[in-house]
Image (spheres, grey):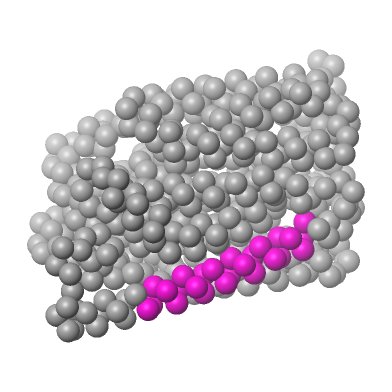
């Protein structure tokens, strides 16, 4: 899907590529790469969030007290945020497919052996290890997609990738509902079978990524010689937008001096607090509406499917129109409406409707904000530093999210819902600040261009020819 782009115009670069050939190449890449990376992220989200599907059973069988379950949820993100940046460096050195295959072997084993936990100690250790392995996935895949897709193609592809997190909720609910009915088979509880079977399923990802995902797109097994010639031209076009990929500390420092980065990171943190809390505790929230443990699992499925469909639709629309701010605001207001319903209405069917509203907006708030920051930063290492910081701050939200839905606040979960509502309000304010800042910067750039006072040495998004998108 082609969108309105803020990229610097490069004379003759695009016209050298035949549109039909370029479209055919994109279809080839999309058919192979997007299903693989989306499948990996679906597995990752499935394995990290299954704790929400079996929370009540874990509390009973592991003899958990007080906030011990919440600690097990939060500790995942303590290690998760520490491995994101080094993971991208190591992946470049050893190759994407090998690196991700090793990572997936690690987290598959952790999930499988989680089925044999006996105490809070086992829960903490397995969650720490899972966070260490899964923390490597998202930043590596994001940088990988950035390197093979052009700027005006990237957001829709990131949307498909990130949309797997919503689909994992639907698939996870269905899978949990089916596996939990094995309760008592071979003398084991259903939740233990859930971990064991999901761990075995994750091993499929090892084979898929190792043999299917090319380390470098110009050497991809599914491209012919003509395709590879176009890849060379596309790489040159990318260089004009993403900048030279020669590492310079000055580019990293520019990222940390840029107000856009801090505004975006704050919005990401707030929306991630809400998303992580929602996706982890949705089964617990629905259970308080009067449903049984098994019924809860399939009651989550339509909520996540609705969220995924709306997110993917809006992401494609945002790419087509070149707009970000208006969709983020609409999504934030939708989430607000959902949490207001959960806080104020006690009718079970109305509260269930509130969960749909939350899902419809949350994935947009998180996913579109990532693409927005990506669109408005250049050159390459400034963008990498900006996105790395945004994601590190955002994933710290998981530590907070694990503590706001506590057992003693059931069944209304006033603390969790109110905290989530407050966070989404702050995120909305950040979107407004970001749009205002970008509009002001664009006005200044147009003025300098009109007056002939532009700095000819400015590069990346500092150049007056780089127009910010909002």
- Residue at 72% of width from left, 45% of height from top? 402
Q: Position of residue 230 (x, y in %)?
A: 16, 46
- Residue at 50% of width from left, 73% of height from top? 433
Please state if 426 lies on the left or on the right of 211 as rendered: right
Q: Position of residue 120 (x, y in %)?
A: 79, 27
Q: Quadrant of residue 4?
A: bottom left
The furthest residue to the top: 186
Q: Position of residue 344 (x, y in %)?
A: 84, 70
In this rendering, the count of numbered labels is: 0
Please state if 165 lies on the left or on the right of 142 as rendered: right
- Residue at 54% of width from left, 34% of height from top? 134
Magenta-drawn stretch contains 235: no
In the rendered structure, which segment of residues is drawn in magenta? Answer: 416-440
**326 vs 381, nearest the viewer:** 381
Eyeballing the image, is 331 above or below 162?
below
- Residue at 27% of width from left, 54% of height from top? 379
Kindly report the secondary structure that dominates the magenta region of the rendered protein.
helix
* Observer able to see residue 3: yes
Quadrant location, the N terminus = bottom left
Please state if 339 lies on the left or on the right of 431 as rendered: right
Q: Quadrant of residue 210?
A: top left
* Observer able to see residue 298: no
Magenta-drawn stretch contains 434: yes
Quadrant location, the C terminus = bottom left
Please state if 237 lies on the left or on the right of 54 as rendered: left
Q: Position of residue 306 (x, y in %)?
A: 62, 58
**123 vs 288, nearest the viewer:** 123
**37 vs 183, nearest the viewer:** 37
Eyeballing the image, is 1 above or below 167?
below
């Amino acid at each position: 899907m082609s969108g309105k782009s803020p990229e610097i115009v490069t004379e003759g670069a695009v016209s050298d590529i035949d549109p039909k050939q370029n479209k055919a190449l994109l279809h080839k890449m999309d058919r192979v790469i997007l299903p693989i990376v989306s499948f990996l992220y679906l597995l990752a989200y499935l394995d990290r969030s299954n704790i929400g599907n079996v929370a009540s059973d874990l509390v009973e069988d592991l003899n958990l007290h007080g906030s011990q379950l919440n600690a097990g949820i939060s500790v995942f993100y303590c290690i998760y945020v520490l491995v994101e940046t080094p993971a991208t460096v190591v992946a470049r050195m050893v190759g994407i497919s090998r690196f991700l295959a090793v990572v997936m072997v690690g987290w598959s084993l952790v999930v499988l052996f989680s089925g044999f936990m006996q105490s809070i100690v086992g829960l903490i250790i397995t969650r720490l290890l899972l966070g260490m392995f899964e923390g490597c996935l998202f930043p590596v895949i994001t940088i990988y997609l950035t390197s093979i897709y052009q700027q005006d193609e990237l957001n829709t592809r990131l949307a498909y990738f990130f949309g797997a997190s919503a689909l994992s909720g639907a698939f996870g609910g269905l899978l949990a509902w089916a596996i939990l009915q094995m309760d008592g088979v071979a003398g084991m509880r259903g939740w233990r079978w859930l971990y064991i079977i999901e761990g075995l399923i994750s091993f499929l990802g090892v084979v898929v990524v190792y043999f299917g995902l090319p380390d470098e797109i110009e050497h991809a097994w599914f491209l012919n010689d003509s395709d590879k010639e176009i890849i060379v031209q596309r790489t040159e076009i990318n260089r004009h937008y993403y900048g030279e990929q020669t590492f310079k500390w000055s580019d990293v420092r520019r990222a940390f001096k840029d107000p856009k980065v801090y505004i975006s990171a704050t919005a990401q943190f707030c929306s991630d607090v809400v998303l992580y809390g929602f996706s982890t505790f949705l089964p617990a929230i629905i259970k308080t509406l009067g449903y049984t443990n098994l019924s809860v699992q399939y009651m989550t499925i339509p909520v996540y499917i609705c969220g995924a469909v709306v997110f993917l639709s809006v992401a494609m629309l945002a790419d087509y129109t070149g707009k970000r701010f208006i969709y983020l605001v609409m999504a934030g207001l939708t989430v607000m409406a959902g949490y207001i319903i959960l806080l104020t209405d006690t009718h079970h069917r109305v509260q269930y409707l509130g969960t749909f509203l939350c899902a419809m907006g949350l994935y947009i708030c998180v996913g579109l904000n990532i693409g927005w920051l990506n669109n408005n930063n250049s050159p390459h290492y400034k963008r990498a530093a900006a996105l790395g910081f945004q994601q590190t701050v955002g994933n710290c939200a998981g530590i907070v999210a694990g503590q706001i839905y506590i057992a003693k606040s059931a069944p209304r979960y006033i603390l969790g819902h109110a905290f989530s509502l407050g966070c989404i309000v702050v995120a909305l304010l950040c979107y407004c600040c970001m749009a205002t800042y970008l509009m002001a910067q664009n006005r200044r750039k147009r003025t300098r261009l009109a007056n002939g006072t532009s700095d000819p040495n400015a590069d990346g998004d500092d150049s007056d020819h780089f127009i910010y998108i909002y």
